[in-house]
Amino acid sequence: MWLETLLLTTSLLLPNQALAKTNQQNLSSVVQAQLPKQSIMPKAALERLLTTEPIKTQWFTSEFVAQVPIAQIQKIIASLKQGLGNYQRVEEEGKNYKVVFARGYVPAQIALDANGKIATLFFQPPVAQAKSLEEAIAQFKTFPGKVSFLVLEGKSERAALNTTTLLAVGSAFKLAVLQTLKSQIATGKRSWQDVVELQPAWKSLPSGILQTWPDRSLLTLQTLAALMISQSDNTATDSLINIVGRQAIESLTPRNRPFLTTRELFLLKSAKNQDLLKRYRSSNESQKRAILKSLVSQPLPDVREFAGNQPILDVEWFFTAKELCELMTQVTDLPLMSINPGVAKAEDWERVAFKGGSESGVLNLTTWLKAKNGKQYCVAATWNNDAPLEESRFLNLYSSAIAGLRDDL
């Protein structure tokens, strides 16, 4: 249920974690100086990494390898080649690099130690090179399962595929929670500065950080909202659902009744609760609410249970691409929406707002963009399939759409 940036320093994040920590891309600690006794230059080290098999442990510092298995590095590079095609070349861009593949490129940074060993390696989200939005749609149509794709310029459709199809959207549902909170603040019912105590019953599983905080920690609604959007913090989300009220959110999205908390979703999808899940599926709304109430006393499952689990697509949060863009445009004025720009390069735009979502079989990316000439766009894409998703391929096409909009300006 989260997406994070692909970042290799002395640690490595996998491709299905490619978006929610983009705001944490602080590379000020990267060693840039290249000392004379290096046996290889950075560009050559990057080229070797992408062209030579097998990848060798001695190419990296011992500190790097201690935390990043070589097999993981091979998996990352294989994923890039799978999504973008065959490796072509490395191009220098100032102190950084562009790794060019047959169907796109990946901005990269690399730093070597004094002995020419890789101490830091950083890949930004890949950029596919679909020639047009029409080509992007044509490629999305080849994906297994169901895909929706919408590009709006203002209120006009630039591209549309299944834009009124209801799909599971993972953590993108948090836009509805934020909009409900914003509405209550606008009426004076609440304030961004309101302070609440973190309740143990509100704690959920990662993504996020608040699940590890002490019970009764004091937090403002502003902090909870910022963590919910920028880090997709599930405990912050469940806190806000309990604060603003489930029924208030349901009035905004009546199809999602009852509106689940992330904690409830994890419990329903736990392997230990298969009978309960079966009963929930066959129940009416009032019966479902009773089942959710019974979950309050249940302990959370182990988060590791959900790594690579079989998709369960019928118990989720469901929105169309049009609904996501409508929600996004209602909250883009909030500064917290720009903490994490997702796959878009924030420097290319006047302003970027982003929220994505993912879990097994579910992937969504929703981005609002304001160009430096004043034009505004919304780009929403969702993919559902009852089998593991080829996430890099989806991310590449989505990035290509955003890059194409930028290039058209």
Image (cartoon, helix red, strand yellow):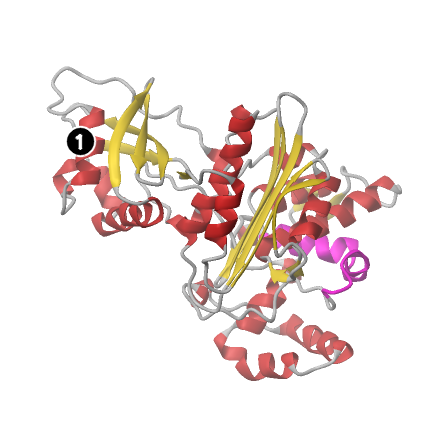
Q: Residue shown at 75%/47% (left/top)?
A: 179
Q: Is residue 36 left or right of residue 198?
A: left
Say above or below: 177 vs 57.
below
Q: Residue shown at 29%/32% (left/top)?
A: 120
Residue 197 visible in the shown view: no
Q: Residue shown at 43%/59% (left/top)?
A: 389
On whether residue 3 falls in the magenta region, the answer is: no
Three-letter residue code for mark 1: Lys
Judged by its main secondary structure, the magenta piece is helix
Give the magenta-colored segment's residue range. Answer: 234-256
Estimate the x, y position of residue 19 in percent, counting from the top left. Answer: 48, 43
Q: Which residue is mark 1?
A: 117
Q: Is residue 121 left or right of residue 170?
A: left
Q: Residue shown at 66%/45% (left/top)?
A: 224
Q: Residues within 10 Å of mark 1 (few under 14, many from 20)?
A: many
Estimate the x, y position of residue 154 in percent, counting from the top left. Answer: 71, 35
Say above or below: 334 vs 327.
above
Provide the secondary structure element on which disc 1 rests.
loop
